[in-house]
Image (cartoon, rainbow, N blue to C red):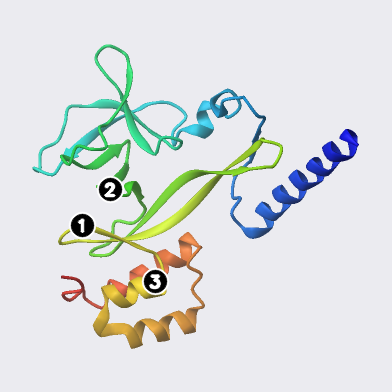
């Protein structure tokens, strides 16, 4: 009887993993973590962090000032920018402090939303920008094991003041209320996939030609 239960759990685990891949949630290698094992012991550093090692970068404050140079990295598990301080310790940039607005790591820039955390900026166009947030998605199975998989979500950043929207049709309608018809026609003609980075860059380039009126109050 125990063997049957164990076999049944293994089948459930297999089907759950297959459903993850079929749903499109899985976009990178998945890691299976057995009960009682900390994910850090299974998932390597290069997968847990955005960069394979800490890289030189800067913090940009809401006051317009720029920090000294730090060794920085983005911890995907903690969803936190971390730095190596003068003592050689790895510490997180205080998520509760409202002073940090942008972070630069090498040539990459991150925008920090006070409520939602850090987003990688993918485009340099003005005024609308494309953002990406990568997190680790955990699926817990009846056996107690967990499957960890990277999940990539896209967002839109509008200026004055900086505000983040989900990258979807309804957000575009809110941001460009006077150009809903033009955007709808463009989406229809070009078959834009809102889960595709290249397609989102395409629609953002188009929207930035429309001019951004007073889109939110």
Tags 1 and 2 touching, CB below 8 Å: yes
Label 2, label 3: how far apart the Cα atoms are: 21 Å
Q: In the image, 211: left or right of 71?
A: left
Q: In the image, 129: left or right of 10?
A: left
Q: What is the crowding at mark 2: few (fewer than 14 residues within 10 Å), some, or many (at least 20)?
A: many
- Rendered location of residue 192, percent (x, y): 49, 73
Q: In which quadrant is the N terminus drawn?
A: top right
Label 1, label 3: how far apart the Cα atoms are: 20 Å
Label 1, label 2: how far apart the Cα atoms are: 9 Å
| Quadrant of residue 105 within the rendered picture | top left
- Rendered location of residue 176, percent (x, y): 27, 77
Foreground mark, 1 or 3? 1
Please give the residue where the numbered disc 1 appears in the rendered image: 162
- Label located before the other in sequence (1 or 2): 2
Q: Is residue 214 above or below residue 154?
A: below
- Label located before the other in sequence (1 or 3): 1
- Rendered location of residue 109, percent (x, y): 30, 44
- Rendered location of residue 19, percent (x, y): 70, 55
Please give the residue where the numbered disc 2 appears in the rendered image: 111
Please give the residue where the numbered disc 3 appears in the rendered image: 203
Q: Is residue 101 visible?
A: yes
Q: Is residue 69 above or below residue 32?
A: above
Q: What is the crowding at mark 3: few (fewer than 14 residues within 10 Å), some, or many (at least 20)?
A: some
Q: In the image, 36: left or right of 133?
A: right
The answer to which of 56 and 32 lies nearer the viewer is: 32
């Amino acid at each position: 009887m125990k063997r049957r239960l164990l076999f049944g759990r293994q089948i459930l685990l297999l089907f759950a993993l297959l459903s993850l891949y079929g749903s499109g949630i899985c976009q990178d290698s998945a890691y299976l973590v057995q009960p009682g094992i900390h994910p850090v012991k299974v998932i390597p550093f290069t997968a847990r962090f955005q960069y394979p090692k800490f890289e030189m970068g800067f913090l940009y404050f809401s006051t317009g000032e720029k920090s000294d140079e730090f060794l920085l990295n983005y911890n995907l598990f903690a969803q936190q920018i971390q730095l190596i301080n003068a003592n050689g310790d790895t510490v997180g940039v205080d998520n509760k402090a409202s002073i940090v607005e942008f972070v630069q790591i090498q040539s990459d820039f991150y925008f920090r939303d006070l409520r939602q955390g850090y987003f990688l900026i993918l485009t340099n166009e003005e005024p609308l920008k494309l953002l990406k947030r990568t997190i680790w998605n955990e699926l817990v199975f009846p056996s107690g094991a967990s499957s960890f998989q990277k999940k990539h979500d896209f967002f839109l950043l509008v200026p004055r003041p900086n505000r983040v929207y989900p990258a979807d049709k309804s957000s575009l309608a809110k941001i460009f209320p006077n150009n809903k018809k033009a955007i709808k026609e463009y989406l229809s003609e070009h078959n834009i996939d809102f889960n595709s980075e290249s397609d989102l860059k395409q629609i953002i380039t188009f929207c930035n030609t429309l001019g951004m009126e007073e889109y939110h109050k």
